[in-house]
Amino acid sequence: MTDLAQDLLSSFVVAEPQLNGSRNLGVVHLRKEALDRFEAQGFPTTRDEEWKYTNLKPVLKHDYRILLKGDDAVSFADIKSYLLSDLDTYKLVFINGKYSSWLSDSTHQEFDVCTFAAALNKYPDIISEYLGKGAPKGETFVDLNTAFADDGAFIRVKANQTVDKPIEILYLTTNENGPAFSQVRNLIIAEQNAEVQLLERHQNIGDQPSFTNFVSEVFAARDARVSYYKVQNDSDEATLVDNTHVVQKEQSNVHVGTYTFGGKLVRNNLHFYSGGEHAESHMDGITIIGDGQTVDHHTLVDHQEPNCYSRELYKGIYLGKSHGIFNGKVMVRQKAQKTNAFQQNDNILLSDKAKVDTKPQLEIFADDVRCSHGCTIGQLDHNALFYLRSRGIPKREAEGLMTYAFAADALEYVKIPQLEKRLNHVIAEKLGINLEFAL
Amino acid sequence: MIKINNLQARVEDKEILKGINLEINPGEIHAIMGPNGSGKSTLSSVIAGREDYEVTGGSIDFEGEDLMDLDPEERAHKGIFLSFQYPVEIPGVTVSNFIKTAINESRKGRGEEPMEAREMLAKMREKTALLEMDKSYLSRSLNEGFSGGEKKRNEIFQMAMLEPKLAILDETDSGLDIDALRIVAGGVNKLRTADNAVVVITHYQRLLDYIKPDFVHVLFNGRIVKSGGPELAHELEEKGYDWIKAENA
C-alpha cells in the first residue's frame, strides 16, 4: 500500500465526523463501505488492464495535504480568466474543495443550482435516491471519492424546466501550504423534459502539485437534455482523475464535450448508461498537449435498451514529448436491438517523441445493431497542404491551419457560441496560428 | 512573363513531361488542350511547385527569375496562382479566414504591411459581387459541402482577391453547368488587364467560347505538338483528338 493510501485511511478517521451529511446514517454507511473497498484495492498500477498505459506512481509520490482549507484571499480578479466573461451564467466556485459563496452566483428559485454540502443536509431523500447510483462501486477512485467528498455542485432541474442560463462550475486549488489532494463531487439531476447546460473547469492556481479526484453523477430522466462541457487547461503541476457517470432514460439527450489542453496528467473516465429507448448519447473531445503531459480518455457507452444512438468523436493533437491514450468501449447488451453506435478517434502526431495508444473495444450481444468504429494516427493531408501553400500560406502556417481544422471539427455540438469562440481561440493559440472568430 | 524551356518532369518512375516549351507574355490568354493523361495537370502543378513531381530537366523562368528552387508559397508571393481541378475541403476554416491569411501571408512574403481590415472587407464584398456569390459564402467552411460549381466559383473568388500576375485555371469548366460557367468565365474576363496573363487548361472547347484565347496549344504525350490561334480549338472540337494522336503516333 502506498504512503498516500495509508495517509488517506488515517485521515478518514479524523475527517469523517466533520464531513457534511455526517448525521445522515445512509451517507455515513455509504462512506464507510466505500472506504473499506478502497482499502482493499488501493491505487491502481500499470499492472491493472485499465491503467496499463498510465502510470500514476510519479504523481502519487508527493506529500499531499488531504484535509484542505478554503482560501478567503482569492478574489474575482484571480478567477476571471477561467470564466466566460462575455456571458451571464450561474456560478459555483469552490476553493480547495470548499464552496466560496462570495465568488458564486447560485439559486434556489425554480431549480437548484447550489452545493452538494447543502443538499446533503437539505434533501436527504434525494441524496439517498441518487447518491452513488450512477458511479459504480468497486472503482477505486469512485470509492475513495465517495468516502471523502462532502462538497461540490448540486444541480436539480425539476420536470419541464429549462435553466435560463448556463451554469459554470469552477474548482480551484490554491495549495499555498504544499501539495494538495482534493476530492469534490457533483450531483446533477435533470428530471423529465428538463434542460440544462453546464461548463466545468478544474484549475490549480498555486505553484505546488495538486491531485484532484473528482466524481460527477448525472441523471437524465425521460426527454431531459443535458449539455456538459469540460474545459481542461490546467497547470503543469496538476493531476486530475475525472469520473463522470451519466445515467439516461427514454428519449433523453446528453452531450459531454471534453476539451483538454493542459495538466500534467488527466484521466477521464466517462461512462454513459443508456437505459431507455431512443436515448441519445454524445461525447466528443479535443486534446492538444505537449511536453511532459499525459491525457488518458477511458470511455464507456453501455447500451441497455433498444433503439438508442451513441456518437463518439475524439480528436488528438500531440506535440513534444506527450502521451495520449484513448480507450473507447461500446457495450451493446442482448436486449439493446437496433442500437446505432458510432465511435471515431483520430490523432495527429506533430513530433517524433509524441506517443498515442488507442484501443476501441466493442462488446456486442445483440444481433440487429449498427456499430462502427475507427481510429487513425497520422500526419496531415499532403494534397491539402499543397493547396494552402499554393495560395501563399507558408508551410508552417498551413500546417497550423490544417491542424486547427482537424481539431475544430469536434466543436460542432457546442451549443454556447461564447464557449465555441473561446475554444477556437485556445486551439488557434496552442497551434500558433492567427485566426479571427466571430460569434 | 514566363518562359518554359524544355521542361521535363516525372512522378516516381513515370516520365510525364518530355520537353515542354512555352512562352507567355503579359496580357495574353493561352489555352492548353489535350486528351486525358497528356500531362496538362502535371504541367500546371509543376509551375505551381508541387513537390510530388520531380523536375528532371529544363527550366521555368518567371519575370527573369528561375522558379525551380522556390517553394509553392514563394511562387504564390511572386504572383502565380493555380485554380485547382479538385479544390480541397478544409472544414473548420472559413472562406474569409482563409483568404485573409492567404493575402496577408503573401504580403508578408513580399515585405508589405498586412491589409487594413476595412480594405479587406470592402474587397471581399466587391469580389463576391463580381462572382454573384452571396455574402454568406464568406462565413462557410472552405469548400465544405460546396457543390462543384460553388467550389470553382470560390477558386475564381480567391484569384480575384489575390490578383495574380499569372493565373492557371486547371479544368475550371469541369462540373459546371452553363450558368455557373458563364459567371466564372465572366469573372475571369473582368479580372484581365494588360499586365496579367491567364492559362486555361481544358479538355473541351466550351469554356473557350467565354474566355477567348489568343493562343491554343495541344499537349499530347508530354509535349506540345501543335500551337495555333483560336481556330485550333474549333478544329479540335470538330475532329476530336484522334488525328493528333495519329500524327504523333
Image (cartoon, rainbow, N blue to C red):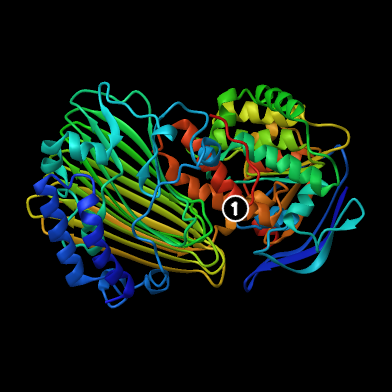
User: For the residue carrying disc 1, how many other residues have a C-alpha within 10 Å: few (<14), some (14-19), or many (20+)?
Assistant: some
Name the residue rendered at 63%, 44% in the picture: B171
Give whichever of A214, B33 is nearer the camera: A214
Identify the chain of the residue marked 1, using the numbered disc in the image: A
Task: Give how far across and how far down residue A304 sits, in percent.
Answer: 12, 49
Q: Eyeballing the image, is B197 above or below B22? A: above
Task: Give how far across and how far down residue A33 sits, in percent.
Answer: 12, 60
Q: Quick check: can you spot residue A418?
A: yes
Quadrant where the image shows the N terminus of chain A: bottom left
Task: Give how far across and how far down residue A10 sits, in percent.
Answer: 25, 67
Q: Quadrant of residue A54?
A: bottom left
Name the residue rendered at 35%, 37% in the picture: A198
Task: Give how far across and how far down residue B124 sits, in percent.
Answer: 69, 27
Q: Quick check: can you spot residue B243?
A: no
Q: Is residue B62 left or right of residue B9?
A: right
Give whichever of B210, A112 is nearer the camera: A112
Q: How many marks?
A: 1
Give whichever of A110, B121 is nearer the camera: A110
Q: Is residue B211 left or right of residue A300?
A: right
Q: Is residue B61 left or right of residue A149?
A: right
The type of residue carrying mark 1 is Leu
Element assignment for label 1: loop
Q: In this figure, which residue is indicated by the disc labeled 1?
A: A431
Q: Residue furthest right?
A: B64
